[in-house]
Amino acid sequence: MKGHHVAYIRVSSVDQNTDRQLVDVGIEFDETFTDRVSGKNRNRPALQECLRHVRKGDWLHVHSIDRLARNMVDLLDIVEEVTRRGVTLQFHKEKLTFTGEETPFQRLQLQMMGAFAEFERAMINERQREGIEAAKRKGKQIGAKPKLSPGQVEEIRALIAEGVSKKRLAEKYGVSRQTIYASLDR
């Protein structure tokens, strides 16, 4: 039996477009698995399904190394796992193919490209932290705005002291009980 050509596509968020990945590669895919989540770890539904799906003789096609994994451990584990099972893994952007019989140079290339993907993720996280800190220094609201004003929280504290239930207060203020509890912790 001829192996199947399986595509794995990943973007980091729901609003990103997958159209640029694995286009014009001249292959008709038998199955395509698409994740719209971060590649920070292996806990991705489509990736897990894809890894369960591929069989000996199949080809797993990925646009680029950073689409498969954003850290070295996951990358090397996934490559080892699929090639050990007789699946050929092809990264189209880097023009790298892995079968489990790689030369030391091919393994070095994989590790270097994986290190760049991991470094890029670390830089993204650092820029995000810097942006959040700069916004905080400027007094910008970070995260969701509080559902209750400071005055409402004080009213709620007083009503609780009088014995009014949190459930009733949640109904009165149009919020969940969890919001009541969270506002009391501030």
Image (cartoon, helix red, strand yellow):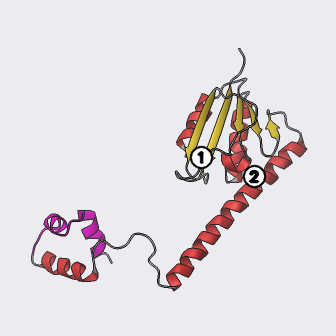
Residue shown at 72%/61% (left/top)?
A: 119
When the figure is inspected, residue 45 is found, relative to residue 174, above or below; the finding is: above
Residue 33 at x, y = what percent? Answer: 59, 36
Q: Quadrant of residue 184?
A: bottom left
Dominant secondary structure of the residues highlighted in magenta in the image: helix
* Whole-percent x, y for residue 127 in the image: 63, 71
Residue at 61%, 29% in the rendered image:
31
Q: Amino acid at mark 2?
A: Gly
Where residue 86 appears, as percent x and y from the top left, is 74, 27
Report which residue position mark 2 lands on: 114
Q: Is residue 119 magenta?
A: no
Q: Residues within 10 Å of mark 2 (few under 14, many from 20)?
A: many
Q: Is residue 116 above or below residue 98?
A: below
Please report whichever mark, 2 or 1, sits nearer to the chain's N-terminal start: 1
Q: Which residue is mark 1?
A: 42
Q: Where are the magenta residues, as a range?
A: 163-184
Q: Please tell me whether mark 1 sits on a helix, a strand or a loop.
A: loop
- At a point 70% along the width and 47% down the height, the residue shown is 75
Quadrant where the C terminus sits is bottom left
